[in-house]
């Protein structure tokens, strides 16, 4: 990172600090190296990540405020550099980036406090002879995509729960004598500092088949903004949304209130698909939960955004609603995963083996009151990310059965394998021999330093 970039990022962080609350404990920057790793350097050349929070309630009553997070993940732009030990037999092996702090356990990484990790491309420097070093670069534009549902639980100084942060600021506002209505009428902004870490491993050739590796790391704080857009119409005064009718000369209250949809969210245990992706494999079934007040009809559609672009699932899901008989309702829909990868050229890449795809989904809904002849406007509600990964399938000897895929019903994590038999390289324990592999292709060769 050059001096101008450092100055720009520092000024931006200072400006944010004057208009918002810095939340929770800030981790001190830290680093650790080993015999094989001289230095690991992590920088954030971009700006803070932004998480928007929106009131999705159709009611302007402060008691009906329903906050929903508008993003399913954050992007962290990061530059990484790893310098291997001062020995021409030591060469770079790999790097990983983590959301959370790291530590060293002997010569390897202790990542118990980190909440999420991913492989990462970094520039790296290795000695190639006496007084000669070579630096290999990356293609640039590297970013670390962090799903919010993976980092909402954990240590308070590491986790990111935007709704929790908004509520903490609300409670502080109320304790200071402010009103709930005034809080939601105005824009709110919270600035979080969260630890992000880079780890790098270098290996040393000792003899054929014996090339142990050791690690180093650096942890720095990254800035995340949580933003809520205020609504000046929010009120703590009673709202009369009933209709007054006349029976003779006596006014009577009409119980046919306007239909209001307060909440629509995806099921919390998203059924990610990991396994068989052949024609005939059942499409994943996903549930939407919703609730509101009044009586009428609700229509839903599901918007999807992924690497192939944006699209809307073709089906419109229709449901009658009556809060007097049942407040909490739901509907299930089939995500057309298999259909799209085999019937649409645009999505055929979805069946690439052992590649994880993310599908960011958003619920849109419109309502029609029982006394109305038309639907209201489409409004956005909850969002979530569905993931799939196709795995190779093998026939089990001694039977006619094949191991198929499964749908993860327990959590939003993506295990490497379950219900499949795969052949994959095994990482040897730290300090033990591994088969020497071909060195990575040299991308940029600098003059000797």
Image (cartoon, helix red, strand yellow):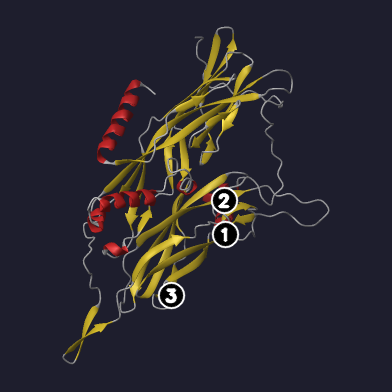
Q: Residue at x 25, y 37 (%)?
A: 18
Q: Are marks 1 and 2 in contact (CB under 8 Å)?
A: yes
The numbered disc on residue 40 is none
**Circle 1 sits on which residue?**
284
Q: Earlier in the sequence, mark 1 or mark 2?
A: 1
Q: Which quadrant of the structure image shows residue 216? A: top right
Q: Looking at the rendering, which quadrant does residue 427 occupy? A: top right
Camera-side residue: 268 or 401? 268
Q: Which residue is mark 3?
A: 326
- Of 208 and 170, which appears nearest the observer? 170
- Relative to 441, does residue 306 appear above or below in the rendering? below
| Location of the N terminus (image quadrant) | top left
Compute the Cα span from label 1 to label 3.
27 Å
* Furthest residue toward bottom: 248
Question: How packed is label 3: few (under 14 Cα within 10 Å), some, or many (20 or more)?
Answer: few
Residue located 25% across and 77% down the image = 242
Q: Is residue 64 above or below residue 449?
A: below
User: Residue 322: x percent and y percent?
Assistant: 39, 76
Tell me if 303 is positioned left or right of 393 in this view. Answer: left
The residue where tag 2 is placed is 388
Asked if the residue at tag 3 contacts the one at tag 2, i.e. Cβ–Cβ closer than 8 Å, the answer is: no
* Mark toward the start of the polypeptide (1 vs 3): 1
Return the x and y of residue 288 as percentages of the image width and height: 47, 63
């Amino acid at each position: 990172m050059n001096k101008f970039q450092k100055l720009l990022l520092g000024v931006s962080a200072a400006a944010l600090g004057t208009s918002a609350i810095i939340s929770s404990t800030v981790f001190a920057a830290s680093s650790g190296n080993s015999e094989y790793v001289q230095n690991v350097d992590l920088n954030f050349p971009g700006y803070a990540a932004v998480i928007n929070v929106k009131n999705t309630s159709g009611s302007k009553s402060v008691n009906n405020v329903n906050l929903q997070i508008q993003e399913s993940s954050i992007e962290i732009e990061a530059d990484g550099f790893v310098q291997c030990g001062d020995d021409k037999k030591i060469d770079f092996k790999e790097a990983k980036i983590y959301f959370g702090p790291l530590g060293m356990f002997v010569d390897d990484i202790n990542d118990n406090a980190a909440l999420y990790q991913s492989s990462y491309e970094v520039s790296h420097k290795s000695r190639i002879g006496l007084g000669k070093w070579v630096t290999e670069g990356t293609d640039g534009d590297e970013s670390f995509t962090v799903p919010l549902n993976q980092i909402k639980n954990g240590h308070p100084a590491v986790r990111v729960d935007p709704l929790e942060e908004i509520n903490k600021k609300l409670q502080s506002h109320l304790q200071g004598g402010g009103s709930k209505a005034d809080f939601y009428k105005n824009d709110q902004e919270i600035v979080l500092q969260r630890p992000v870490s880079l780890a790098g491993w270098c290996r040393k050739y000792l003899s054929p088949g014996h090339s142990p590796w050791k690690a180093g790391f650096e942890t720095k704080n990254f800035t995340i903004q949580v933003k809520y857009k205020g609504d000046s119409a929010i009120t703590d005064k009673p709202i009369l949304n009933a209709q007054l009718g006349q029976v003779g000369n006596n006014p009577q209250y009409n119980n046919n209130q306007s239909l209001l949809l307060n909440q629509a969210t995806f099921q919390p245990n998203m059924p990610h698909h990991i396994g068989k992706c052949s024609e005939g494999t059942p499409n994943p079934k996903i549930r939407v939960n919703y609730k509101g007040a009044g009586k009428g009809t609700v229509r839903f559609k599901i918007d999807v955004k992924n690497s192939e672009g944006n699209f809307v699932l073709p089906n419109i899901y229709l449901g009658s609603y009556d809060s007097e008989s049942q407040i909490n309702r739901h509907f299930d829909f089939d995500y057309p995963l298999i259909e799209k990868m085999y019937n649409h050229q645009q999505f055929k890449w979805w069946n690439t083996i052992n590649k994880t795809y993310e599908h960011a989904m958003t619920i849109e809904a419109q309502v029609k009151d029982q006394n109305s002849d038309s639907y209201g406007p489409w409004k956005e509600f909850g969002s979530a990310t569905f993931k799939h990964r196709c795995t190779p399938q093998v026939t089990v000897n001694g039977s006619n059965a094949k191991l198929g895929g499964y749908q993860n019903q327990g959590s939003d994590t993506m295990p490497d394998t379950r219900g499949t038999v795969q052949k994959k390289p095994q990482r040897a324990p730290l300090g033990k021999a591994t088969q020497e592999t071909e060195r990575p292709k040299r991308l940029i060769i600098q003059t000797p330093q």
